[in-house]
Amino acid sequence: MEAPRRTLVVHGGAGDWSEELRAKAMAGIDRALDAGLAAFDGGPLEACLAAVRVLEDDPLFNAGIGATLNSEGFVEHDAAVMEGRDLRAGAVGAVRGIRHPVDLARAVMDDGRHVLLVGDGASRFAASAGVETADPAIFLVDRRRRQLDEWRRGDGDTVGAVAFEDGHLAAAVSTGGYTGKLPGRVGDSPIPGAGLYADDRLGAAVGTGTGELFIRLVLAKFAVEQMASVNAAEAATGAIDLLDRRLQGRGGIITVDREGRAGAAFNTGWMPWGDRTDATP
Ligand code: ASP
């Protein structure tokens, strides 16, 4: 098989997906892959962003419009981006009223002064950076209201993407966290090394699952470091094994290595994910 020139891997969150939602989730993953592939001309980060934006717009996924509600009944988003070339990263935590949180993460990276902005300061930065804001009420979708009523913890469906192009790697992630989290809680997603990591010398990874455990294990960095000696699929499996063995955690991860091979692993009921490669010069 010809070596891929471009690879995009996308996931829609590891969790307990009901049978009836699985086909819809895979349709969403396909739309995200289409959008990401179409954006590759701008580089691997643009491909990740385009894919994640599609999933943020889909109320099925726990990101953007469909994000889970916290214990007080409102949405706070986390999101991040990272590029493997110079290890540049940008992230936002517990932000409200941002239409596409992943765009705000990208604006933080482009601005370059900081890696992570949270809460109100991040919202004010959005205004100055020209990132689209939204009425926080648009994020209150019925399915999430019902989930808050049931207060089910562990319904993780963060979205994420990793991409490879001509030796360069990128990662993007966006989430509402999980139902019933405390206001102000920041998960693993916007923390480089925990929820995402990209290094052109090794690989890229994006995780989904109980964020507190990903932070404690620095799990995305662990997966990426594995790719010094194993391929993307083995690194993904190794990371989820560690999550399981060390902290009895549940979650999933997608990976791409420096040769453009894709990987994914999860130990939850299911995780919608998919990958596309392109070998054409
Ligand atoms: N990792 C996310 C968080 O803890 C949730 C998830 O992926 O399900 O914020």
Image: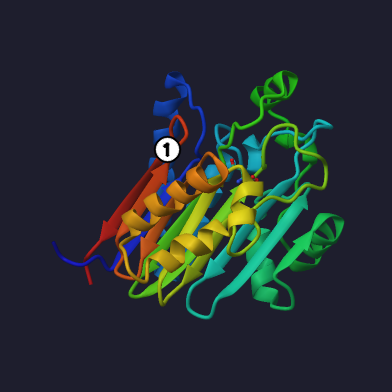
Write the residue at 80% across / 60% down.
Answer: 122
Q: Is residue 232 above or below residue 67?
A: below
Write the residue at 42% across / 20% down.
Answer: 19
Image quarter for ligand 1: top right
Q: Is residue 23 above or below residue 82?
A: above
Query: Which quadrant of the rendered structure holds the N terminus?
Result: bottom left
Residue closest to the eye, 174 or 65: 174
Q: Position of residue 231 (x, y in %)?
A: 30, 62
Mark 1: few/some/many CA within 10 Å (<14, 14-19, 20+): many
> Judging from the image, what secondary structure is the residue with disc 1 in?
loop
Is residue 102 visible in the rendered image? The answer is: no
Query: Which quadrant of the rendered structure holds the C terminus?
Result: bottom left
Q: How many marks?
A: 1
Is residue 156 visible in the rendered image? The answer is: yes
Question: Mark 1 highlights which residue?
Answer: 272
Q: Residue furthest bottom?
A: 86
Identify the amino acid type marked 1.
Pro
Write the residue at 50% across / 38% down.
Answer: 14
Colour pattern of the rendering? rainbow
Q: Residue furthest left?
A: 1
Q: Position of residue 188 (x, y in %)?
A: 64, 53
Q: Position of residue 58 (x, y in %)?
A: 55, 37
Relative placement, left or right, of 186 versus 30 is: right
Residue closest to the eye, 107 or 71: 71
Q: Position of residue 114 (x, y in %)?
A: 73, 74
Write the residue at 47% across / 54% down.
Answer: 161
Q: Is residue 275 above or below residue 28?
A: below
Relative placement, left or right, of 171 versus 235 is: right
Q: Ligand 1 closer than 8 Å to the CB at disc 1?
A: no
